[in-house]
Amino acid sequence: MSPLKQVALDTSILVGLIDSRDIWHPAALALRDALKDAQAQLVHFDCVISEAINVLARRDRLGELLLLGLSQIKIQEVLLLYQRGLVSFGRAAELTGLSEQEMVRQAKAFGVFPRWSEKMAEEEAA
């Protein structure tokens, strides 16, 4: 297993990911996908989030940023339920509205690794 790679996102990338009208939107999406493929953990500093909020507020995109934040909080809360054994991984994905594949990516980003038995892996592969 390779060591965990952490990548800090700057304001321009964060804003580009959120605002589809931003000049850096295509590059930000490409970077996000490349980092996912590299299994990198994205790190957000408070000062960058604060700056992104200010930029987006000036662009009337604050609502989108709040929804994105709420979505991440929901994912974290559901992963906590999963870690405590209160819901299955499939149910966790349902509760967040994500596919199981995307839920695996989100879980790994938060340092949660799904527990798969051999039987479950065989059922998933079928």
Image: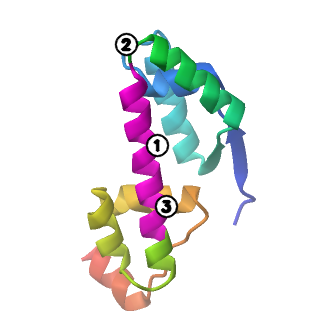
| 75 in the magenta segment | yes
Sequence order check, earlier mark of 1 and 2? 2
Sequence order check, earlier mark of 3 and 1? 1
At mark 2, the secondary structure is loop
Is 41 in front, or is 51? 51
Task: Name the residue type under label 2.
Answer: Arg
Quarter of the image for the N terminus: give it.
bottom right
| 63 in the magenta segment | yes
Is residue 92 shown above or below 46?
A: below
Instruction: Name the mark nearer the viewer: 1 or 2.
Output: 1
Expressed as whole percent of the image width and height from the top left, the position of residue 113 reads: 55, 71
Q: CA distance from mark 1 to mark 2?
A: 19 Å
Residue 110 located left or right of residue 23: right
Image point (37%, 12%), residue name: 21
Q: CA distance from mark 3 to mark 1?
A: 11 Å
Query: According to the image, label 2 marks what residue?
Result: 21
Q: Identify the mark at residue 76; answer none if there is no mark.
A: 3
Is residue 38 shown above or below 48?
A: below
